[in-house]
Image: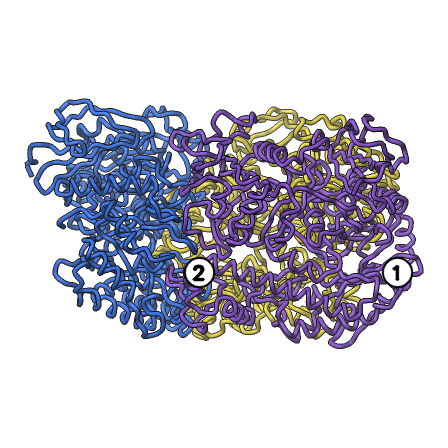
Chain colours: A yellow, B blue, C purple
Amino acid sequence: MQQLYYGVAYYDEYMPYERLQEDIRMMKAAGINVVRIAESTWSTHEPQNGIFDFTSVDRVLDAMHEAGIHVIVGTPTYAVPTWMVKEHPDVLAETPNGPGRYGARQIMDIANPTYLFYSERIIRKLIGRVCKHPAVIGYQVDNETKHYGTSGPNVQHRFIKYMKEKFGTVERLNKEFGLDYWSNRINGWEDFPSVAGTINGSLGAEFSRFQRQLVTEFLAWQVSIVNEYKQPDQFVTHNFDFDWRGHSFGVQKDVDHYEAAKALDIAGVDIYHPSQDELTGKEISFGGDSTRSLKGNNYFVIETQAQAFPNWTPYPGQLRLQAFSHLASGANMVAYWHWHSIHNSIETYWKGLLSHDLKSNPTYEEAVTIGRDFKQLSANLINLKKENRTAILVSNEALTSIEWFKLPGGEVRYNEMVRLLYDRLYEMNIGCDFLYPSAYDRFENYDLIVVPALYAASDELLEKLNRYVESGGHVVYTFKSGFANEHIKVRTGIQPGIIEKACGIQYSQFVEPNKVSLKGNPFGVDEESNQVKVWMELLTPTKAEVLAWYDHPHWGTYAAITENKYGRGTATYIGYVPSSEVAGKVLERACKAAGIYGPDQALRFPLIVKSGVNEAGRTIRYYFNYSNQPESFSYPHGNGIELLSARNIASGEQIALDRWGLVIIEESEASMK
Amino acid sequence: MQQLYYGVAYYDEYMPYERLQEDIRMMKAAGINVVRIAESTWSTHEPQNGIFDFTSVDRVLDAMHEAGIHVIVGTPTYAVPTWMVKEHPDVLAETPNGPGRYGARQIMDIANPTYLFYSERIIRKLIGRVCKHPAVIGYQVDNETKHYGTSGPNVQHRFIKYMKEKFGTVERLNKEFGLDYWSNRINGWEDFPSVAGTINGSLGAEFSRFQRQLVTEFLAWQVSIVNEYKQPDQFVTHNFDFDWRGHSFGVQKDVDHYEAAKALDIAGVDIYHPSQDELTGKEISFGGDSTRSLKGNNYFVIETQAQAFPNWTPYPGQLRLQAFSHLASGANMVAYWHWHSIHNSIETYWKGLLSHDLKSNPTYEEAVTIGRDFKQLSANLINLKKENRTAILVSNEALTSIEWFKLPGGEVRYNEMVRLLYDRLYEMNIGCDFLYPSAYDRFENYDLIVVPALYAASDELLEKLNRYVESGGHVVYTFKSGFANEHIKVRTGIQPGIIEKACGIQYSQFVEPNKVSLKGNPFGVDEESNQVKVWMELLTPTKAEVLAWYDHPHWGTYAAITENKYGRGTATYIGYVPSSEVAGKVLERACKAAGIYGPDQALRFPLIVKSGVNEAGRTIRYYFNYSNQPESFSYPHGNGIELLSARNIASGEQIALDRWGLVIIEESEASMK
Amino acid sequence: MQQLYYGVAYYDEYMPYERLQEDIRMMKAAGINVVRIAESTWSTHEPQNGIFDFTSVDRVLDAMHEAGIHVIVGTPTYAVPTWMVKEHPDVLAETPNGPGRYGARQIMDIANPTYLFYSERIIRKLIGRVCKHPAVIGYQVDNETKHYGTSGPNVQHRFIKYMKEKFGTVERLNKEFGLDYWSNRINGWEDFPSVAGTINGSLGAEFSRFQRQLVTEFLAWQVSIVNEYKQPDQFVTHNFDFDWRGHSFGVQKDVDHYEAAKALDIAGVDIYHPSQDELTGKEISFGGDSTRSLKGNNYFVIETQAQAFPNWTPYPGQLRLQAFSHLASGANMVAYWHWHSIHNSIETYWKGLLSHDLKSNPTYEEAVTIGRDFKQLSANLINLKKENRTAILVSNEALTSIEWFKLPGGEVRYNEMVRLLYDRLYEMNIGCDFLYPSAYDRFENYDLIVVPALYAASDELLEKLNRYVESGGHVVYTFKSGFANEHIKVRTGIQPGIIEKACGIQYSQFVEPNKVSLKGNPFGVDEESNQVKVWMELLTPTKAEVLAWYDHPHWGTYAAITENKYGRGTATYIGYVPSSEVAGKVLERACKAAGIYGPDQALRFPLIVKSGVNEAGRTIRYYFNYSNQPESFSYPHGNGIELLSARNIASGEQIALDRWGLVIIEESEASMK
């Protein structure tokens, strides 16, 4: 990558009147150096079956090139044209809610050959046309691809073949999935029912895994087509998105990001987050760490918010804070969705850099300063390398399994646990990578692995974790980890199954707590935070040291949190849903044990520090103030330069940060590495 | 109209045993002089396809005539018989939820020719039979007609023709509705998809407008048939109903009352309202003002509650208060739904004047006093003429558009804003008419026009409002007004678009408020009422005077409420969702500016005064006490007579009102008019 | 019955590995002497159409017999195999939500002949095979049978025949059901519409009654087949279940238990209840009294919880308390669902006696003590006879009618009223039976009949109750009783209809209370408990004494609770939804009037006493402490033996009870009876 990219999604097709030159003028003024086009507008580019019209693509490419703005071209396949649905209604995904209904995007059956035929044709037409245009630096295949719940007869049929391949015999399947229960046995493959109504979580989760595999295959198939046209120096990316809770929140249940990213050159991502008084940087950090970990490399933020919703319109300073926070996690591109606010349809109130009046506004004016600084500091900030010693292990399988077997109340779900732990590391300024179950060769890179609620996991994975501890690693597990195998079959031995060995505890009973707290408040937290909520396992230590006991008339003889030395490492086990405060204390203890608790941990959220090494081999440290009040801190590292102000900084110097402010310090001496 | 009508809906067909003479005896005792019949009982009158049985109609007409009670005959088309649905299941409306299911009323496709064929036949049979009967004074076509969400293939097909007619080319349609977005373009009319799943608000709202037009056409078609039979002195009416929130609440989204009323001789309405401690008279006033404004004339309250639900059973005095409140708004008829409580089916607990025992009861006994007074005072109270100087402009289009583009939280909808403003005028005793967008010639009748959230409006309408202000009118706008055109395309210029000229303000950003209030509490209200909730536009005055600024660390430089002199008038703009208290203060200020703040404004809710001029040219003033405590007031107008007690009243006299009490004062000197 | 049964549901088919001998070893250690098998595993026993495999049945029967454990064999018809649904999708019930979808149990159309054909075949194969096996003591037909909402075309068609049979002519039907309303008349049987969408409660409730009749017929049909194979000394039972509110709660709306039980030899039941701090014994008592009353005899608890859910895992002592509570209500069997926790599918977290590790655990260890005591005390405790003088009259028709005509708010439903009254009797230690409307000959067995909300009732039933009072009985009615006839047609005379005669009150109006309480707090309860909520009838006493008046500015002249002497008995009428406290006071007064208030009433919940006479003619008294604190009481009855400790007890002795503890005292002198 030669420069930091500052970009927008640009839709010439949506413009209410001729705007191209005026838009480019305003983009240039804001330092925008890349636009993404074409990913939503199939019906414009192929107005009728086999009739193509790339006018808007051509003119935008030419005009951008003339202006020196790069272009990423998206394949337009995630929203299908009216003519296709009228000709072939079955291109829409049938889901457990019934057949599809035209209107929204992302409603088609990505396994439907008619859809695939038309998709391939438009991709070849479009990419073939643009691939040699000098403005084009790369491609995005499809957009925020998921499986859209596709589960019609053709998908069910393929699923049977998948199951045959996987299990060989119905007998093996019946046994592993426990299908005798409630007479669910499948005694001949031809009896295999639609799983749309299944009550067997093993079967349901396997179908979800199959659906995720459809996504992986679909994206790889698109990439393989685009690769036929891709020129040297061009890249293929995709914008992954996250489990959505009104904003980007956690692991995406419908896509295996790790597998799907293998086909890509560069991982890309959409990151949307709360703003105004709710802006914390957590989602920026989470999304960045997660995406950087897919390919172990720098990544693109292909979409993030400019003005967006009424409750997200940024306060002065926030747009800058956000942009540099992305860089601090290793992004090489920050691009807004989108350039201009749209005048019709469902995303009218998802505002872009420009308001509906298409004029300057305070948010745009702040972008101008970001573009200027990106350009100025590109060489210092690009290709930031991060070497974190902590990782969090996340798993689609565990997520799906906890959807099937919900915790009492249903409010604490898998991603709540992921975020409960991740957010504590973020607040402590512990840099963090993500680990995926199949990334076996990476485990040893870390001193500490944090494992939230790993409910469904293979023997192999758990044994790998045991060996990791034995050979000196540190693991923090929560409740439910190890409980079931990869087919969500509960393990038939004493719990927590295979990891009992490393954890040195046992349990066979678990209850929903009612007026339970930790005995003697061992972590010295407030009363509310000391309480035990939602779920508690009645742990009996066999070898482990008990960090906390339950306080309850009947369950007081059981442990809540334990720590066990195993081989040269330690395994911590949290048997209940801890409060943020207790989770933080347990993680702090584990970080210290793992020897990764250093001077950056003197700062705590809302003061956030992120670091890495730049191309010149110098350490870059970003300091962010995620609050409405000015803050200051004592800079503990070697002398350097504050890049935004070009001011020298001495070690130990007290540095002030505006509300929602930031500084970037490049250490003068190159890093050892 | 020769007399005040006091009426009931009467269903001889539902009676558990022979009751006709006994019912008539009790009606006479209660002064009931009109009954409405036949509108719900198609299956009784046509028990089999083409077999007619009007026995119950005939006998009721004869008996009523003998008793001197008038009859309104309803066409029975709003509930279809079992045989029809069995023969032609497609007479039931297909909606986005699927095909229809027999059971309830108002479930048919009003565009279905089979249904229309049978409807026409029963109408001709019934109306042809009764039209010369001396008991019959008029007709009600259908009942509370709406479009019932009909949107099956035939309706979609007609909609395409409507769109062709309206837009001419797909290109124009694509542009105006922004259909490039998410590949929604329609590049050939034959590609036009069902809009049941559309995510394009312009398209969705246009379909709603088309559905409302179906209602207008359907009612006009029924009226045209009935008119073939109608005798001189007979009338045709219809009972419109309102947006329902457990009771009549606001503008009906599924019917354009103003257009639909054009075919009628007299506008009729259903008004249902909270009761007991919740009785305020607001819905009576709202419904009356709204319906009176349809044809600019007196109207019928065709249905209102007698006992109704357990939480509506009136306290002693309330039934009287309600009845005279209707008259005070210009009603010439007050009729209850219904005479007797039903012994089976879904409205068993929607009680009539009689309880299930069909005997006298406290509510019935109070009706007896109303009937007596109506008869006694008919000549004084009938045909009350009202000349209000204030109007509120309401719009189906604005309502629909705000359903598509909801305010944050979704709780403040269009009708909440209508009522927020209307109810404040009511509490101030400011008489009010309603204006509809197409009633252009009426604008100039008013000194003040109140415009809630006019989100979707044509250039023409907004320019009309600008001219209205310029030539001396006063307008109070709320937020969102002027934002989009009549196709819900957001205006591409600076906001608030065309009305910027009259309002003297601009904005390009809007946010969801969080801990925001009005700076310095400019209206001197309580702290809670001074807060800014739900929605706030960041207004910058260009010429306007600022009545209130936001108080917030970041948004404090923007205005919340402004007032602008433009030409000879003023335009007030409220940029956020004000509390009732602030809304009241702003409206009070506007009323004063418009010169319509007089002696009646010395009284405030729960003391309500309503006035008009009777046929003798004398001013009638109703004073109502909408509270559980006795109240009194000083009477400020000319000497007169209290009609209920036939007592002389002197100007300045202190007048006492019982809890839920009323007096009616006829001024002795005829009005100038 | 020769011995107390202590049992489990056992599924060899679900076991993750070979366990049979180990399971039997652990069962024997726990005193388990009966297992129920086969009721859920059709697909195991008939893996393909017509191919049978009873291996698991045979081997379990043989092994159990060898171990001396009895077996109940269930017909496996409540969960259908995949092959059947693939061949005949229409075996799944079509409901108002659409066609069935494979997955869960209890989803078939119990009126479908294909299903019935296959059911009969598997029943004959299975029962024919096992009936002479010495381990088999009886059979359970199907499992928790209900009608599953079946309402497809075939069921609608049969319903028309049922209606023809019942009403003869459409005219009679139209009149009785009030079908003129909203044009719902059926003027020819061939016009009869599907009732899936009906808004007529009479029609809807009649369809529900028809559906319940399908259940009665289905169970009787299964019993008739099984009876062909049943050997002397074998029995046929069924496990009824209750209205489910997260646990067993009240009258089952979808089954007429009383009618359905007629075909059985012994009534069986599932009882699931809250546990831990929420354990009260109420559901155990309610379910037991209800089931014992079906056939007026001892019954089986075929399913109750062992560990079950995380919030039900019993505290130490609770499993024992529960087991003996069942016996105290007259159960001869206490069986757990189920032996072992399952490792896959939807009930993975509905844990059995064994946890997923299939080892011993604290709950299992407590079961060991129960099995020991059951065996030890079997002769003393079996076949307990109870002669209660109080009964509560419950009715499927009343329940359904109140589902159609809900009380304001919808939260107080029929079963809430049943439990409001039942629970108060339980807390007072008043033994109670259940009465069903058609059990006419049993009314005279009681001194007090409690009648909650008997909204729908025939003239015959109400006259029967009047005569019951007249001849010396005592009745406590609540509001709504007598209001409508058995077709939910509201009575056309003064309310409360026929029972007015016994109650000496009248009303024609009812309201939803708002700030209403009882005047002068006549029962001396706390302020909250003195309030009037949800529903109030405006009662006017004609002859009754008023126990409580409403306190309200407008409704203060009406009575809330009345008592009337009629003939030699009294009828109490509660006109509103009383608090628990007031309900308790009113029932206490009625019990005293009926002469059934004795020494056991000196104890109150959480001290519960239950009694009966054993086979030796001696009175057995169980004393239970349903609380977390130790309690004690003075024993007022004759000298006896505490059976668990074999300790002599003297009359008047103070007896201590552990938290969740119990004692069982057998009076030494045989009862007079």
Foreground of the two, A4 or C318: C318
Left or right: where A438 falls relative to A306: right
**Identity of the residue drawn at 81% across and 55% down:** A460
The answer to whether dots 1 and 2 both sit on one chain is yes
Left or right: where C550 falls relative to B6: right
Q: Is the residue marked by circle 1 packed among few (<14), some (14-19), or many (20+) residues within 10 Å?
A: few
Q: Is the residue marked by circle 2 packed among few (<14), some (14-19), or many (20+) residues within 10 Å?
A: some
> Mark 1 falls within which chain?
C
Q: How far from the left and from the top, in percent, is residue C410?
A: 51, 45
Residue B339 numbered mark, or none: none
- Can you tell which of label 1 and label 2 is closer to the viewer? 2
User: What's under tag 2, amino acid-wise?
Assistant: Glu
Q: Which residue is mark 1?
A: C18
Q: How far from the left and from the top, in percent, is residue C662?
A: 80, 35
Foreground of the two, A168 or B663: B663
Residue B517 visible from this viewpoint:
no
Residue A299 visible from this viewpoint:
yes
Q: Is residue C570 above or below residue C133?
A: above
> Mark 2 falls within which chain?
C
Q: Which residue is mark 2?
A: C176
Left or right: where B382 falls relative to C164: left
Name the secondary structure under disc 1: loop
Foreground of the two, C383 or B80: C383
Name the secondary structure under disc 2: helix
Sequence order check, earlier mark of 1 and 2: 1
User: What's under tag 1, amino acid-wise?
Assistant: Glu
Q: Is residue C230 above or below residue C326?
A: below
